[in-house]
Image (spheres, rainbow, N blue to C red):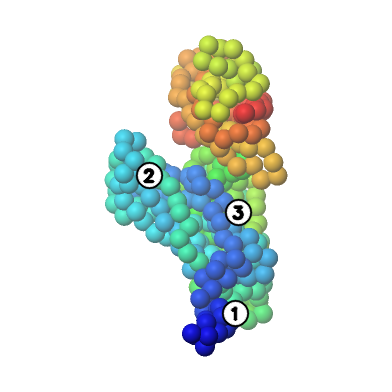
Amino acid sequence: MKIILGLFLILTLLPISSAFSQVTDTTSTLSVMLTSNSPYVYHDDDGYTIVVGSVKNTNTNTSVKNVQIRATFYDDVSPTPLEFSQGTTVLQVIPSLGTSPYMIKSKTPNPQITQASVFLEKFDSSISKSKLLSVDLSDIYVDENLVVSGMLKNGPAPVTNATVYAAFYDGFNPPRILDIMSVDIGNMTANQQVPFNFNEKINPSSVKLALFAETNVFYSAYVERVIPAPEVLTKLVTISDVSITDTYGKPLSEIKLGSTVNIRSNSIIELSPDYTSSEIPYRYFVQVKETGEKPFVEFVGKYDGRYMGEGKQSQSVDWIPEKKGLFFVETFVWDRNNVPIADQGPVAIILVS
Protein backbone atom coordinates (compact mmCIF):
# COMPACT_ATOMS: atom_id res chain seq x y z
CA MET A 1 0.00 0.00 0.00
CA LYS A 2 2.81 2.47 0.84
CA ILE A 3 4.47 1.69 -2.51
CA ILE A 4 1.20 2.41 -4.42
CA LEU A 5 0.63 5.65 -2.49
CA GLY A 6 4.17 6.77 -3.18
CA LEU A 7 3.78 6.14 -6.94
CA PHE A 8 0.51 8.11 -6.94
CA LEU A 9 2.14 11.13 -5.28
CA ILE A 10 5.03 11.05 -7.75
CA LEU A 11 2.64 10.96 -10.72
CA THR A 12 0.64 13.91 -9.41
CA LEU A 13 3.82 16.00 -9.22
CA LEU A 14 4.90 15.27 -12.81
CA PRO A 15 4.09 18.05 -15.41
CA ILE A 16 1.33 17.37 -17.96
CA SER A 17 2.62 16.83 -21.50
CA SER A 18 2.53 19.97 -23.69
CA ALA A 19 0.60 17.95 -26.27
CA PHE A 20 -2.49 18.19 -24.09
CA SER A 21 -2.27 21.99 -23.94
CA GLN A 22 -1.66 22.70 -27.62
CA VAL A 23 -5.13 24.09 -28.33
CA THR A 24 -5.08 26.28 -25.24
CA ASP A 25 -1.64 27.65 -26.06
CA THR A 26 -2.65 28.44 -29.65
CA THR A 27 -5.78 30.25 -28.52
CA SER A 28 -3.95 32.30 -25.90
CA THR A 29 -1.13 33.44 -28.22
CA LEU A 30 -3.24 34.15 -31.31
CA SER A 31 -6.17 36.54 -31.35
CA VAL A 32 -8.45 37.06 -34.34
CA MET A 33 -11.75 38.91 -34.09
CA LEU A 34 -14.63 40.06 -36.26
CA THR A 35 -14.58 43.84 -36.40
CA SER A 36 -18.39 43.86 -36.19
CA ASN A 37 -21.09 41.31 -35.38
CA SER A 38 -23.47 43.24 -37.68
CA PRO A 39 -22.05 42.86 -41.21
CA TYR A 40 -23.53 44.46 -44.32
CA VAL A 41 -26.08 42.15 -45.99
CA TYR A 42 -27.62 42.57 -49.45
CA HIS A 43 -29.02 40.60 -52.41
CA ASP A 44 -27.06 40.56 -55.66
CA ASP A 45 -28.61 40.75 -59.13
CA ASP A 46 -29.09 36.97 -59.21
CA GLY A 47 -30.94 36.88 -55.87
CA TYR A 48 -28.12 35.45 -53.74
CA THR A 49 -27.56 36.97 -50.31
CA ILE A 50 -24.12 38.53 -49.81
CA VAL A 51 -22.56 39.14 -46.38
CA VAL A 52 -19.62 41.58 -46.22
CA GLY A 53 -17.47 42.41 -43.20
CA SER A 54 -13.89 42.35 -41.94
CA VAL A 55 -11.58 40.45 -39.60
CA LYS A 56 -8.73 41.84 -37.51
CA ASN A 57 -5.60 40.03 -36.34
CA THR A 58 -4.88 41.64 -32.96
CA ASN A 59 -1.68 39.69 -32.33
CA THR A 60 1.47 41.84 -32.30
CA ASN A 61 3.87 39.15 -33.54
CA THR A 62 2.12 36.44 -35.55
CA SER A 63 0.39 36.39 -38.93
CA VAL A 64 -2.65 34.16 -39.47
CA LYS A 65 -4.09 32.21 -42.40
CA ASN A 66 -7.03 29.90 -43.18
CA VAL A 67 -9.47 32.20 -41.38
CA GLN A 68 -12.87 30.49 -41.61
CA ILE A 69 -16.11 32.45 -41.10
CA ARG A 70 -19.57 30.94 -40.94
CA ALA A 71 -22.65 32.91 -42.01
CA THR A 72 -26.12 31.94 -40.83
CA PHE A 73 -29.10 33.20 -42.84
CA TYR A 74 -32.57 33.96 -41.43
CA ASP A 75 -35.94 35.38 -42.45
CA ASP A 76 -38.02 37.88 -40.45
CA VAL A 77 -40.44 35.24 -39.14
CA SER A 78 -38.60 32.37 -37.47
CA PRO A 79 -35.43 32.10 -35.36
CA THR A 80 -34.65 28.85 -37.19
CA PRO A 81 -31.87 29.37 -39.78
CA LEU A 82 -32.75 28.99 -43.43
CA GLU A 83 -29.23 27.93 -44.41
CA PHE A 84 -25.52 28.20 -43.60
CA SER A 85 -22.51 29.13 -45.70
CA GLN A 86 -18.76 29.30 -45.05
CA GLY A 87 -16.15 31.69 -46.36
CA THR A 88 -12.69 33.04 -45.76
CA THR A 89 -10.95 36.40 -45.80
CA VAL A 90 -9.85 38.22 -48.95
CA LEU A 91 -6.21 38.19 -47.82
CA GLN A 92 -4.71 34.72 -47.70
CA VAL A 93 -2.43 35.85 -44.85
CA ILE A 94 -3.41 38.59 -42.40
CA PRO A 95 -0.30 40.25 -40.92
CA SER A 96 0.04 41.05 -37.23
CA LEU A 97 -2.32 43.92 -36.30
CA GLY A 98 -3.68 43.72 -39.84
CA THR A 99 -7.25 43.65 -41.16
CA SER A 100 -8.83 41.82 -44.08
CA PRO A 101 -12.35 42.00 -45.54
CA TYR A 102 -14.43 38.92 -46.19
CA MET A 103 -17.39 38.22 -48.48
CA ILE A 104 -19.71 35.22 -48.06
CA LYS A 105 -22.43 34.20 -50.52
CA SER A 106 -25.55 32.18 -49.69
CA LYS A 107 -25.82 28.74 -51.27
CA THR A 108 -29.18 29.50 -52.89
CA PRO A 109 -30.93 32.61 -54.30
CA ASN A 110 -33.54 32.54 -51.53
CA PRO A 111 -35.72 35.72 -51.49
CA GLN A 112 -36.93 34.89 -47.95
CA ILE A 113 -33.49 35.64 -46.50
CA THR A 114 -33.59 39.06 -44.84
CA GLN A 115 -30.75 38.96 -42.31
CA ALA A 116 -27.58 37.13 -41.41
CA SER A 117 -25.21 36.58 -38.51
CA VAL A 118 -21.53 35.64 -38.67
CA PHE A 119 -19.29 33.49 -36.49
CA LEU A 120 -15.50 33.09 -36.54
CA GLU A 121 -14.85 29.34 -36.71
CA LYS A 122 -11.08 28.80 -36.96
CA PHE A 123 -7.71 30.17 -38.06
CA ASP A 124 -4.07 29.03 -38.13
CA SER A 125 -0.75 30.71 -37.49
CA SER A 126 1.25 31.55 -40.62
CA ILE A 127 4.66 32.54 -41.89
CA SER A 128 4.54 36.29 -42.44
CA LYS A 129 4.60 37.87 -45.86
CA SER A 130 6.76 40.91 -46.59
CA LYS A 131 5.21 44.34 -47.07
CA LEU A 132 7.01 44.97 -50.35
CA LEU A 133 4.11 45.68 -52.73
CA SER A 134 3.08 49.26 -53.49
CA VAL A 135 -0.31 50.42 -54.79
CA ASP A 136 -0.26 53.90 -56.38
CA LEU A 137 -3.60 55.53 -57.23
CA SER A 138 -3.41 57.86 -60.23
CA ASP A 139 -7.04 58.79 -60.94
CA ILE A 140 -10.54 58.42 -59.47
CA TYR A 141 -13.81 59.87 -60.76
CA VAL A 142 -17.50 59.05 -61.04
CA ASP A 143 -19.65 59.12 -64.16
CA GLU A 144 -22.18 56.31 -64.52
CA ASN A 145 -19.55 54.04 -62.96
CA LEU A 146 -16.68 54.58 -60.56
CA VAL A 147 -13.42 54.69 -62.52
CA VAL A 148 -10.19 54.04 -60.63
CA SER A 149 -6.76 53.63 -62.23
CA GLY A 150 -3.35 53.10 -60.73
CA MET A 151 -0.10 51.15 -60.70
CA LEU A 152 0.92 48.01 -58.81
CA LYS A 153 4.67 47.96 -58.06
CA ASN A 154 6.31 44.66 -57.16
CA GLY A 155 9.15 44.10 -54.69
CA PRO A 156 12.65 42.65 -55.29
CA ALA A 157 11.60 39.09 -56.21
CA PRO A 158 9.36 37.36 -58.80
CA VAL A 159 5.82 36.68 -57.55
CA THR A 160 2.71 34.79 -58.58
CA ASN A 161 -1.04 35.36 -58.14
CA ALA A 162 -0.78 39.15 -57.82
CA THR A 163 -4.22 40.66 -57.16
CA VAL A 164 -5.38 44.22 -56.49
CA TYR A 165 -8.48 44.61 -54.29
CA ALA A 166 -10.89 47.50 -53.80
CA ALA A 167 -13.07 47.70 -50.67
CA PHE A 168 -15.95 50.20 -50.49
CA TYR A 169 -17.19 51.77 -47.24
CA ASP A 170 -20.33 53.70 -46.26
CA GLY A 171 -20.58 56.86 -44.15
CA PHE A 172 -21.39 55.26 -40.80
CA ASN A 173 -18.92 55.60 -37.93
CA PRO A 174 -17.33 53.10 -37.75
CA PRO A 175 -17.92 52.53 -41.47
CA ARG A 176 -19.26 49.28 -42.91
CA ILE A 177 -17.75 47.50 -45.90
CA LEU A 178 -20.38 47.44 -48.66
CA ASP A 179 -18.57 45.60 -51.44
CA ILE A 180 -15.23 44.12 -52.50
CA MET A 181 -13.88 44.02 -56.06
CA SER A 182 -10.64 42.64 -57.48
CA VAL A 183 -8.37 42.76 -60.52
CA ASP A 184 -6.12 39.76 -61.23
CA ILE A 185 -2.62 40.78 -62.31
CA GLY A 186 -1.01 37.31 -62.35
CA ASN A 187 2.73 36.75 -62.34
CA MET A 188 5.17 39.65 -61.95
CA THR A 189 8.93 39.86 -62.30
CA ALA A 190 11.14 41.54 -59.69
CA ASN A 191 10.46 45.31 -59.40
CA GLN A 192 7.92 45.19 -62.23
CA GLN A 193 5.18 47.82 -62.47
CA VAL A 194 1.75 46.87 -63.89
CA PRO A 195 -1.19 49.27 -64.43
CA PHE A 196 -4.64 48.33 -63.14
CA ASN A 197 -8.12 49.74 -63.66
CA PHE A 198 -11.56 49.46 -62.05
CA ASN A 199 -14.60 50.61 -64.03
CA GLU A 200 -17.64 49.35 -62.14
CA LYS A 201 -21.07 50.31 -60.92
CA ILE A 202 -20.88 50.66 -57.13
CA ASN A 203 -23.27 50.86 -54.21
CA PRO A 204 -24.46 54.52 -54.13
CA SER A 205 -23.88 54.59 -50.35
CA SER A 206 -20.13 54.17 -50.86
CA VAL A 207 -18.22 57.23 -49.66
CA LYS A 208 -14.70 55.82 -49.22
CA LEU A 209 -12.44 53.46 -51.15
CA ALA A 210 -9.51 51.35 -49.91
CA LEU A 211 -7.07 49.73 -52.34
CA PHE A 212 -4.67 46.94 -51.34
CA ALA A 213 -2.83 44.04 -52.98
CA GLU A 214 -1.35 40.60 -52.24
CA THR A 215 0.83 38.02 -53.97
CA ASN A 216 2.16 34.63 -52.91
CA VAL A 217 4.94 36.27 -50.83
CA PHE A 218 4.26 40.05 -50.63
CA TYR A 219 1.43 42.35 -49.58
CA SER A 220 0.79 46.11 -49.63
CA ALA A 221 -0.45 48.81 -47.31
CA TYR A 222 -4.03 50.08 -47.65
CA VAL A 223 -4.46 53.21 -49.80
CA GLU A 224 -7.66 55.09 -48.88
CA ARG A 225 -9.47 57.78 -50.86
CA VAL A 226 -12.80 59.60 -50.59
CA ILE A 227 -15.18 58.80 -53.46
CA PRO A 228 -16.46 61.91 -55.25
CA ALA A 229 -20.19 62.32 -54.58
CA PRO A 230 -22.71 62.94 -57.42
CA GLU A 231 -23.38 66.67 -57.35
CA VAL A 232 -27.17 66.58 -57.87
CA LEU A 233 -27.78 64.37 -54.84
CA THR A 234 -25.91 66.27 -52.12
CA LYS A 235 -27.37 68.30 -49.27
CA LEU A 236 -31.03 68.24 -50.26
CA VAL A 237 -32.02 67.68 -46.64
CA THR A 238 -30.95 69.13 -43.29
CA ILE A 239 -31.46 67.07 -40.11
CA SER A 240 -32.17 68.99 -36.89
CA ASP A 241 -33.67 68.71 -33.38
CA VAL A 242 -32.58 65.17 -32.54
CA SER A 243 -34.12 64.05 -29.23
CA ILE A 244 -34.83 60.92 -27.17
CA THR A 245 -38.29 60.74 -25.62
CA ASP A 246 -40.46 58.25 -23.76
CA THR A 247 -43.59 56.80 -25.36
CA TYR A 248 -45.56 59.90 -24.21
CA GLY A 249 -43.17 62.33 -25.93
CA LYS A 250 -41.35 63.50 -22.77
CA PRO A 251 -37.65 64.33 -23.48
CA LEU A 252 -35.15 62.11 -21.64
CA SER A 253 -31.46 62.41 -20.75
CA GLU A 254 -31.37 59.07 -18.90
CA ILE A 255 -33.36 55.92 -19.59
CA LYS A 256 -33.85 52.58 -17.89
CA LEU A 257 -32.52 49.32 -19.29
CA GLY A 258 -35.22 47.48 -21.26
CA SER A 259 -37.57 50.46 -21.56
CA THR A 260 -38.92 51.58 -24.95
CA VAL A 261 -37.77 55.02 -26.08
CA ASN A 262 -38.38 57.03 -29.22
CA ILE A 263 -35.53 58.65 -31.17
CA ARG A 264 -36.97 61.65 -33.00
CA SER A 265 -35.64 64.29 -35.37
CA ASN A 266 -36.89 66.90 -37.80
CA SER A 267 -35.63 67.38 -41.33
CA ILE A 268 -36.02 70.26 -43.74
CA ILE A 269 -35.87 69.73 -47.50
CA GLU A 270 -34.82 72.44 -49.95
CA LEU A 271 -34.95 71.47 -53.61
CA SER A 272 -32.59 73.06 -56.13
CA PRO A 273 -34.02 74.47 -59.39
CA ASP A 274 -32.41 71.56 -61.27
CA TYR A 275 -34.28 68.95 -59.23
CA THR A 276 -37.48 68.17 -61.16
CA SER A 277 -39.26 65.69 -58.84
CA SER A 278 -41.38 67.05 -55.97
CA GLU A 279 -41.75 63.61 -54.33
CA ILE A 280 -38.64 61.99 -52.84
CA PRO A 281 -38.83 58.60 -51.08
CA TYR A 282 -36.23 58.45 -48.30
CA ARG A 283 -34.87 56.16 -45.58
CA TYR A 284 -34.07 57.61 -42.16
CA PHE A 285 -31.38 55.73 -40.20
CA VAL A 286 -30.59 55.86 -36.48
CA GLN A 287 -27.29 54.45 -35.21
CA VAL A 288 -26.62 54.05 -31.47
CA LYS A 289 -22.99 53.54 -30.39
CA GLU A 290 -21.21 53.05 -27.10
CA THR A 291 -18.84 55.80 -26.05
CA GLY A 292 -15.13 54.99 -25.83
CA GLU A 293 -12.01 54.72 -27.97
CA LYS A 294 -13.48 51.87 -30.03
CA PRO A 295 -17.24 52.50 -30.07
CA PHE A 296 -19.36 49.41 -30.67
CA VAL A 297 -22.58 49.80 -32.66
CA GLU A 298 -25.36 48.80 -30.27
CA PHE A 299 -28.37 49.44 -32.54
CA VAL A 300 -29.32 50.43 -36.09
CA GLY A 301 -32.95 51.31 -36.87
CA LYS A 302 -34.70 52.77 -39.90
CA TYR A 303 -37.86 54.64 -40.90
CA ASP A 304 -39.15 54.91 -44.47
CA GLY A 305 -40.95 58.05 -45.58
CA ARG A 306 -41.56 60.42 -48.49
CA TYR A 307 -40.84 64.12 -48.92
CA MET A 308 -43.72 65.77 -50.74
CA GLY A 309 -42.15 69.00 -51.94
CA GLU A 310 -40.19 71.37 -49.71
CA GLY A 311 -40.76 71.92 -46.01
CA LYS A 312 -40.30 70.27 -42.63
CA GLN A 313 -40.95 66.64 -41.70
CA SER A 314 -40.46 64.52 -38.56
CA GLN A 315 -39.03 61.01 -38.29
CA SER A 316 -38.85 58.57 -35.38
CA VAL A 317 -37.47 55.13 -34.55
CA ASP A 318 -38.16 53.04 -31.44
CA TRP A 319 -35.25 51.61 -29.44
CA ILE A 320 -35.17 49.22 -26.48
CA PRO A 321 -31.68 49.40 -24.88
CA GLU A 322 -30.23 46.04 -23.90
CA LYS A 323 -27.00 47.27 -22.30
CA LYS A 324 -26.12 49.86 -19.64
CA GLY A 325 -23.73 52.72 -20.38
CA LEU A 326 -23.34 56.06 -22.14
CA PHE A 327 -24.32 56.09 -25.82
CA PHE A 328 -24.06 58.38 -28.86
CA VAL A 329 -27.13 58.64 -31.12
CA GLU A 330 -26.41 59.45 -34.80
CA THR A 331 -28.95 60.10 -37.57
CA PHE A 332 -28.76 59.90 -41.37
CA VAL A 333 -31.13 60.39 -44.34
CA TRP A 334 -30.61 58.46 -47.59
CA ASP A 335 -32.77 58.08 -50.67
CA ARG A 336 -34.14 54.63 -51.55
CA ASN A 337 -31.03 53.93 -53.66
CA ASN A 338 -28.97 54.27 -50.46
CA VAL A 339 -27.46 57.60 -51.53
CA PRO A 340 -26.94 60.11 -48.67
CA ILE A 341 -29.08 63.24 -49.29
CA ALA A 342 -28.21 64.94 -45.99
CA ASP A 343 -25.19 65.51 -43.83
CA GLN A 344 -25.20 63.52 -40.59
CA GLY A 345 -27.57 65.05 -38.03
CA PRO A 346 -26.57 66.49 -34.63
CA VAL A 347 -25.23 63.83 -32.23
CA ALA A 348 -27.32 63.18 -29.11
CA ILE A 349 -26.01 61.54 -25.92
CA ILE A 350 -28.08 59.26 -23.68
CA LEU A 351 -27.32 57.37 -20.45
CA VAL A 352 -28.80 53.89 -19.96
CA SER A 353 -28.95 52.83 -16.30
Say which residue label 3 marks: 210
Going 60% across and 42% down the picture, which residue do you hit? Answer: 296
In the rendered view, tell whether residue 48 sits above or below residue 5: above
Residue 200 place in picture, x, y as percent = 48, 50
Circle 3 or circle 1, nearest the eye: 1
Residue 41 picture quarter: top left
Q: For the residue marked with disc 3, what is the amino acid?
A: Ala
The residue nearer to you, when weighing 144 against 131, is 131
The quarter holding residue 324 reads top right
- The tag earlier along the polypeptide, 3 or 2, is 2
Please name the residue that numbered disc 1 is placed on.
Answer: 13
Q: Earlier in the sequence, mark 3 or mark 1?
A: 1
Find numbered disc 2 in the image and state the secondary structure of the residue it sits on: strand
Q: Amino acid at mark 1?
A: Leu
- Nearest to the observer: residue 313 or residue 59: 59
Q: Can you identify the residue that label 2 sits on?
A: 43
Number of marks in picture: 3
